[in-house]
Image (cartoon, helix red, strand yellow):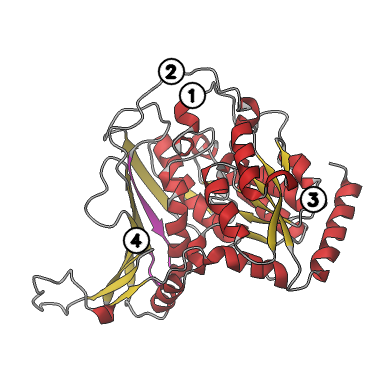
Amino acid sequence: MNPTTTRRQFLAASVAAAARGANDTINLGLIGCGARGRGLLIPRFSAFPGVRFVAVCDVNSKYLAEGRKRAGGDRVAAYSDYRKLLENKDVDAVIIATNQHWHVLTMIAACQAGKDMYLEKPLCNSIGEGPFAIEAARKYGRIVQVGTQQRSQEHYRQAVEMIQAGKLGDISEVRVWDYENYYPGPGSPADCTPPPELDWDFYVGPSPFRPYNTNMYYNYGYDWFRTAGAGHQVAWGVHHFDIVLWAMGVDYPETVYATGGNFAYQTNHDYPNTFTAVAHFGPGPVAKHGFVLHYSMRTGCRRETRSHGKSFMGTNASMLLDRAGYSIVAEPARGAKIPPNDFLVTAEQSIQAKDDHLYHFEVFLNNLRNRKAPVANPETCHHATTLGHLMNISWETGRSIRWDAAHQRVIDDPAAQAFVMRPYRAPWKLEV
């Protein structure tokens, strides 16, 4: 991209954004018309007053046609190449709903084109991409809000405030879990020819090329292959880790160990369906002596507790927190008899979540109109995404790893360090 043109576009977009009034229409472009893009993001953003879609993009022509139809029909421009959409001067801001291996490249290009954006989580497909995303948002002065929507939910904010105020006492352990039932799994189909509507080479993009496989593309299979995902420990874990890091006032762990395998069923997925990890964090503002985080994931059974959640274990009380709300159980004094129904909580100890799980979209639009920096931004999401990737690096190498947060590298382990930045396939390059 020509630097002079980029700078001119950036300045023009900045002036236009500053001049945009509270009642002016925001023209959106959607990059990624998959299930979430066309099924949730288009109808949700279209419902807000003063917002309209003027462009959509996807490498799948069927998804593109359906996305265009839902976004407004023939008046909406349609592109198979995101770079062409970013050249559209009618687009004020973009929503990036691609798979995660495209997040950072597309985000940087949008920043260079002078576009603000809503970027779906997780931030990146390897740790090394994160600093490039952070640099791009800062260099080009863009509003970049990341899709860790729990940041905008009131009950999460209340829970974080209670934790940081010491209401639970000294927290020594945090447990996080993601449980689903995908049994008996998708099997191991053979590689085959991609469907005619899909530009498979463009879809693979910067990742090492692999032949098309139905499990890599449909039914959220992309989460389970290195080409476009990193398992639930990144795709789902980023939501939990974002809240834990926020509540505990820390950014990175010191050491991480993970293990797992395909114990629930057999499949051709790159990542396991049963996975557990332990991360050790040093002293912080909440845990003065440090704490451990236990993460557990399985997709062969969702029973035992709520499917996706986290709990904070304190000396005064423990908190169970998820999207349904939070509940607190007091810790009995040493030697005190624990009642048999201790796991139950009263109404005073339990807070039910408001119906605000999609408020994050409205927050984004308000941030655009007011030129306000989002609290869910590339930096906070980089921290949360990194934790899941560190777990994967430990699992890939089969050993505990130590993380040097200041230099963003694994300590004294070249083999593990090689996973920190996945090489890009030519001609794609990370350039800010």
Residue under pointer 1:
213
Residue under pointer 2:
190
Distance from disc 3 to disc 1, alpha carbons, whole Å, reads: 34 Å
In the rendered structure, which disc, 3 or 1, sits on the residue that comes first in sequence? 3
Q: Residue at x 55, y 57 (%)?
A: 147
Q: Are marks 3 and 1 in contact (CB under 8 Å)?
A: no
Please tell me whether mark 1 sits on a helix, a strand or a loop. Answer: loop
Please tell me whether mark 2 sits on a helix, a strand or a loop. Answer: loop
Q: Residue at x 68, y 62 (%)?
A: 51
Q: Are marks 1 and 4 in contact (CB under 8 Å)?
A: no
Query: How would you rate the neighbour count of disc 1 (Cα within 10 Å): few for under 14, some for 14-19, many for 20 or more?
Result: some
Q: Which mark is residue 310?
A: 4
In the rendered structure, which disc, 1 or 2, sits on the residue that comes first in sequence? 2
Q: Nearer the viewer, residue 159 or 380?
A: 159
Q: Residue at x 23, y 50 (%)?
A: 303
Distance from disc 2 to disc 4, alpha carbons, whole Å, reads: 37 Å
Residue under pointer 3:
113
Please tell me whether mark 3 sits on a helix, a strand or a loop. Answer: loop
Q: Is residue 164 above or below residue 429?
A: below
Distance from disc 1 to disc 2, alpha carbons, whole Å, reads: 7 Å
Q: Are marks 1 and 2 in contact (CB under 8 Å)?
A: yes
Distance from disc 3 to disc 4, alpha carbons, whole Å, reads: 39 Å
Disc 3 marks a residue whose amino acid type is Ala
Distance from disc 3 to disc 2, alpha carbons, whole Å, reads: 40 Å
In the rendered structure, which disc, 3 or 4, sits on the residue that comes first in sequence? 3
| Extent of the magenta region | 274-290
